[in-house]
């Protein structure tokens, strides 16, 4: 499996960034559903906007919500691109994406939030933290490419067949399947 993971390239980083964007959007969807089921609690992006970006609080609530989501999606895309910069041997491990998703969450909770003096962390209970951890596991699964694997590298493209047989044309005959040399 490790050989199918391409080396780090601009395309790899771009695809990982795109997966990060999609993963952040998926997290928004999960958050929308869980917020409708449970008590309404402030998300990390909402806490940052409310506590650290006072100019945005002057906008109508729907604009604040849209900008907050755009910040979250941008952060998700940047996180995905950073994942794409990891060495192939790290990215090829099936656990790397989910672990990366949890590291992103813990990095925010233990590093970014305290640095920005965002005080939402201690206000949430176990259920909220468990939901957020699951949310970031989803992010990691998507960013890790397990739902949409990387295309084969150039070297692997010539060996796309799944069987050890390859198609070979004989002059004046139909295609014959023959073992690879």
Image (tube, helix red, strand yellow):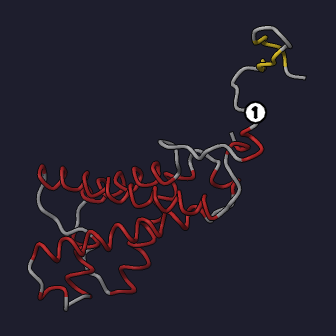
| Residue at point 71%, 56% (across, down) | 7
Furthest-right residue in this view: 181
| Residue at point 66%, 62% (across, down) | 9
**Quadrant of image for the C terminus:** top right
* Camera-side residue of 113 and 152: 152
Furthest-top residue in this view: 173
* Relative to 111, residue 69 above or below: above
| Residue at point 25%, 53% (across, down) | 29
* Camera-side residue of 45 and 106: 45
What SS does tag 1 mark? loop
Residue 110 in the image, given as x and y percentages of width and height: 42, 74
* Camera-side residue of 106 and 141: 141
Horizontal side of residue 40 vs 159, given as left or right: left
Write down the residue under mark 1: 159
Q: Picture quarter containing residue 41? A: bottom left
* Relative to 51, residue 93 above or below: above
Q: Picture quarter containing residue 169? A: top right
Furthest-bottom residue in this view: 55
Furthest-front residue in this view: 172
Residue 11 in the image, given as x and y percentages of width and height: 60, 59
Residue 149 in the image, given as x and y percentages of width and height: 55, 43
Horizontal side of residue 105 vs 36, given as left or right: right
| Residue at point 43%, 67% (across, down) | 106
């Amino acid at each position: 499996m490790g050989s199918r993971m391409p080396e780090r390239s601009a395309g790899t980083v771009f695809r990982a960034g795109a997966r990060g964007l999609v993963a952040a959007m998926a997290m928004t969807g999960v958050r929308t559903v869980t917020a409708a089921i449970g008590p309404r609690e402030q998300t990390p992006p909402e806490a940052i906007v409310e506590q650290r970006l006072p100019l945005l609080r002057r906008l109508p609530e729907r604009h604040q919500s849209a900008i907050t989501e755009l910040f979250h999606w941008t952060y998700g895309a940047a996180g995905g691109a950073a994942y794409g910069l990891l060495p192939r041997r790290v990215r090829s491990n099936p656990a790397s994406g989910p672990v990366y998703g949890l590291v992103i969450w813990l990095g925010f909770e233990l590093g970014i939030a305290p640095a920005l003096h965002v005080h939402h962390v201690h206000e949430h209970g176990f259920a909220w933290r468990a939901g957020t951890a699951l949310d970031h596991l989803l992010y990691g699964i998507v960013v890790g490419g397990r739902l949409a694997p990387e295309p084969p590298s150039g070297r692997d493209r010539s060996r796309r067949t799944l069987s050890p047989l390859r198609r070979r044309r004989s002059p004046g005959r139909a295609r014959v399947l023959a073992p690879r040399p």
